[in-house]
Image: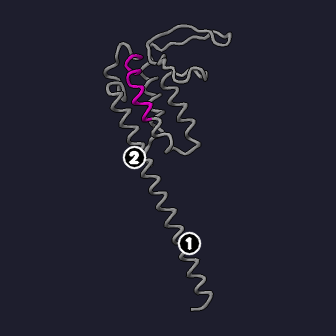
Amino acid sequence: MTFSELLYTIVGIFIGASAYHFLSKDRTDRDSFNQAAKELRDTFLTELKGLYPDPSEWPPRIDVFLKSKFTALQAAVAKFKPFLPKRQQQPFEDAWRKYYGWTGREVDIGLQTYYDYFPTRGTYVLNDEEGSYDNTETYQSNFKANVDKILSFAEPK
């Protein structure tokens, strides 16, 4: 065997080993992501049964019901988040916060309001500007859209 043949053999082995390592790591990462995504979806579907995906059993006090489910959902969200690419972690966190009604103020992180899920209408003043809202026909679709957004991050790869 000549020196150049030996060199080509060594380079070929190195390239092959590197490709194998890269592909097997990608497969392991994908399998881990898919398992975590399944756990997130399963938790949301179990905890929100009767409300999601079809609101067949909407409770009169949706806030009380959702607060009773918060701990299980929060745990599932926290467990899943590290499996997302860094660039998706903040949008995922934003979707989670929107789901439970975070106001956007740091002091209110964790405050569960669920305002978007009540059939209400009214007016408000925010930063000296008046506005109005009407959730009388959209409260259930607001809920579905917010859960859909969270679960969109957990599509299998």
What SS does tag 2 mark?
A: helix
Q: Amino acid at mark 1?
A: Ile
Q: Determine which residue is flagged by label 2.
A: 35
The correct choice, above or below, for 87 with respect to 106 in the image is below
Viewer-proximal residue among 147 and 11? 11
What's the magenta region? 63-76
Question: Please, what is the dominant secondary structure of the magenta stretch?
Answer: helix
Q: Residue at x 48, y 26 (%)?
A: 99
Where's residue 156, x and y in %? 42, 46
Q: Residues within 10 Å of mark 2 (few under 14, many from 20)?
A: some
Q: Amino acid at mark 2?
A: Gln
Whether 72 is among the magenta residues is yes
What SS does tag 1 mark?
A: helix
Give the quarter of the figure containing the N terminus: bottom right
Where's residue 61, x and y in %? 38, 13
The correct choice, above or below, for 13 with respect to 33 in the image is below
Q: Does 139 sit left or right of 104 as displayed?
A: left
Q: Which mark is residue 15?
A: 1
Q: Residue at x 51, y 20 (%)?
A: 111
Q: Residues within 10 Å of mark 1 (few under 14, many from 20)?
A: few
Whether 38 is among the magenta residues is no
Where's residue 135, x and y in %? 48, 15
